[in-house]
Image (cartoon, helix red, strand yellow):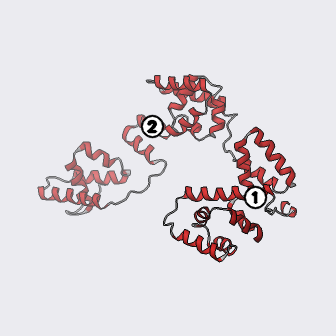
Amino acid sequence: MTLAPVSRPGSARRKAAVAIVALGPERSVTLLRGLDEDSVRALAHEVAALGPVEPAEVRAALFDLEAALAAATSLRAPDNDYTRNLLVQALGERGERIADEVNRPAPFTWLAEADVEQASVALAEESAATVALALAHLPAKPAARLLSRLPEALRRKVATRVAQLTTLHPATVSAVEEALQASVTAVLTPSVQPVPGPDVLASMLQFTPKGDEKDLVASLAAVDPELADRVKAALFTFDDLAVLEARALQTLIKACDTRDLALALKSAEAAFRDNILSNMSERAREGLLEEMDLMLTVKPAETAGARKAIVATARQLEEEGTIVIARPDEDAAA
């Protein structure tokens, strides 16, 4: 067997050997486990050949080690195998088992990532004990969203069960998770495409005859007034003021409160604001600009409220027949 040559005093390898010995076996083993086999072999030869070491050299080696550690301002991002290799090197077969546990996803993670509405419907068919165990393993916010959407009777039972939980064997948790996932997977979809119903209906109604639009919105209001209001809001928005004919816009401006106009236009784009101002008399324009100048800060809620009031006024004027809100050309529906 060829022995590795012994380094000269002051070399990096000798300093490492001195530091390893000075740190002692318990601390040194951690450093050695992070080295490859060739490096460990070379360092072992160096340690074996050390002999007596002067205190000054020991201090210098430890000082250099400390300085090198202090200079490391960042760490390389470990790859997927880093944790497993570290645990296996340190603990052998026991480390392999721990690595499997570490790399295994947290229980019921898939449930936290599912669509809330679908998941709550699926959970409503399960026992309170199963649902409680599942929610107890989720982060607080997704667990709360699911809990609040359960039927009232089940929700109360689940809350009680969660409060009564103490300790559970990991095997029990795994078995319940596996059974629950098998039960509800068919109901859950990996991704859900949201469909903004009011906006979709509003886009359809823009191309229907005016009488049909009113009839359909009225029938919807009889079933769900709030939903009907959302459809009305989508039919005509504040940005749609830009497409009003000059006469209709001028009529609307006169019907609106000056403060609402100022709040609505304070953060509007310059072109949009100039279009509104150009349809006002000089006196009204000056008053509006003065009102806007006096508003140092405007909260988003104030802007939204003012714009909502202006849109409501526009819809009221249209229903009265005072103004006509232009509708898209039929060819645009293609």
Task: For label 1, count other residues whose C-alpha is less than 10 Å away and answer few (under 14), some (14-19) or many (20+).
Answer: some
The single residue placed furthest to the front in the displayed view is: 283
Instruction: Please say whether residue 245 is visible from this viewpoint.
Output: no
The relative height of residue 323 versus residue 225 in the rendered view (above or below) is below
User: Which label lies toward us, 1 or 2?
Assistant: 1
The relative height of residue 166 versus residue 198 in the rendered view (above or below) is above
Can you give x and y, in whole percent of width and height, for residue 170 in the image? Answer: 48, 27
Please give left or right for residue 321 compared with residue 117 in the image.
right
> Does dot 1 land on a helix, a strand or a loop?
helix
Please give left or right for residue 40 compared with residue 102 in the image.
left
The relative height of residue 92 versus residue 44 in the rendered view (above or below) is above
Please give left or right for residue 17 compared with residue 247 in the image.
left
Residue highlighted by disc 2? 96
> Does dot 2 land on a helix, a strand or a loop?
helix
Please tell me the numbered disc located at residue 182.
none
Tell me the residue at 55%/34% (across/down): 108
Which amino acid type is marked by label 2?
Answer: Glu
In the image shown, does 64 or 280 lie closer to the viewer?
A: 280
The single residue placed furthest to the bottom in the displayed view is: 282
The single residue placed furthest to the left in the displayed view is: 55
Can you give x and y, in whole percent of width and height, for residue 153 in the image? Answer: 60, 23
Residue highlighted by disc 1? 317
Tell me the residue at 70%/49% (across/down): 230
Instruction: Please say whether residue 238 is visible from this viewpoint.
Output: yes
Which amino acid type is marked by label 1?
Answer: Leu
Can you give x and y, in whole percent of width and height, for residue 228 in the image? Answer: 74, 46
Q: Could you say which quadrant of the image residue 279 lies in?
A: bottom right
Tell me the residue at 77%/39% (across/down): 222
